[in-house]
Amino acid sequence: MGNRFFEAFFNFFTIPIDLLLIIGIIFFSKLPKEKRVDIHYWLPFFILVFTVFSENLGAYTNFNFEFKKAVNSYLGNDEYPQFNLWLFNFTKRQAGTILYLLLIKSWLEPSKKKYINWMIYIFLAIAGILQFSGIEPLYFNQPIIFAFGANMILTGSGLYFVGMITLEKYLEINLLRLLSFWQMTFIMFTFTLTYISSVALLYLYEVNPVLGEALFQIDTVMEGINLGILTLTIGSPLLPGIFEKEPSYGFS
């Protein structure tokens, strides 16, 4: 039991993101009150907390096989009780997609925010239909749902980059010192790379678990980078002179 517990909760991924969460909590607690209610800070903090919590819950399901088996059985999955895809699908492919769409929306000029609202509504409708109709159940691979979510994320990122090259406010500053630029860049890379590997993920786990696990690490590494950038975003007001003021702060 001791070895299984250690392997589940103390590995190369959970330890770093747990440390990022601790740093994020410290940063957020030190922010002025007006910053803590600003979406540009509380939303990255919420995504950080939600992601780290879901990753640790995933580690718990790998430690407590009976719990994972019981959830699978409740959802109707008695064929693959060793999988926790139900958790992965809900936290990353569904809730995660919505959270990152909201993050992208927070950086867009007002005239483009409505497009993100429609994307969220459409994604919720598509995911609900596919999931509750049994076409893509929660406990199994959901390539169609993830494809819709990934493409919406990429479209939203595209709206940000269009604004970046057309709005005068962006042309007057150093983009490499904008945290929004790094957020959007790595969000775009993450959803592009993980979509390619996710299509065949379940098949690879069955025929070649080692290769499947290796490809899954792409998502792990990119998620770690994204969480690191979100942590920097939370603490950016406490690090004066390093990052430039975001043009979106001046949008009316």
Image (tube, grey):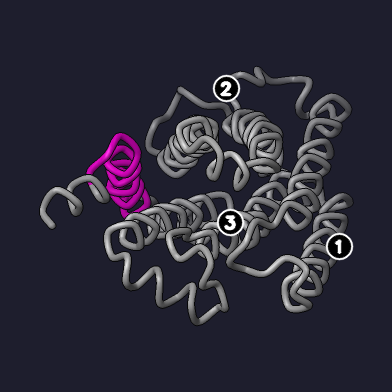
Is 221 placed left or right of 174 in the picture? Answer: left
Secondary structure beneath dot 1 equals helix
* Mark linked to residue 33: none
Name the residue carrying label 3. 39
Q: Mark 3 or 1 closer to N-term?
A: 3
Is 75 placed left or right of 224 in the picture? Answer: right
Task: Name the amino acid type tagged 1.
Answer: Trp
The residue depicted at 70 percent of the width and 44 percent of the height is: 107
* Disc 2/disc 3 C-alpha distance (Å): 20 Å
Q: Quadrant of residue 250?
A: top right
Q: Quadrant of residue 166?
A: top right
Q: Which residues are magenta?
A: 10-30
User: Magenta-highlighted stretch: main secondary structure?
Assistant: helix
Q: Position of residue 232 (x, y in %)?
A: 44, 36
Name the residue carrying label 1. 118
Name the residue carrying label 2. 177
Instruction: Decide which of 49, 163 is in the foreground and name it.
Output: 49
Q: Mark 2 or 3 closer to N-term?
A: 3
Instruction: Decide which of 229, 153 is in the foreground and name it.
Output: 153
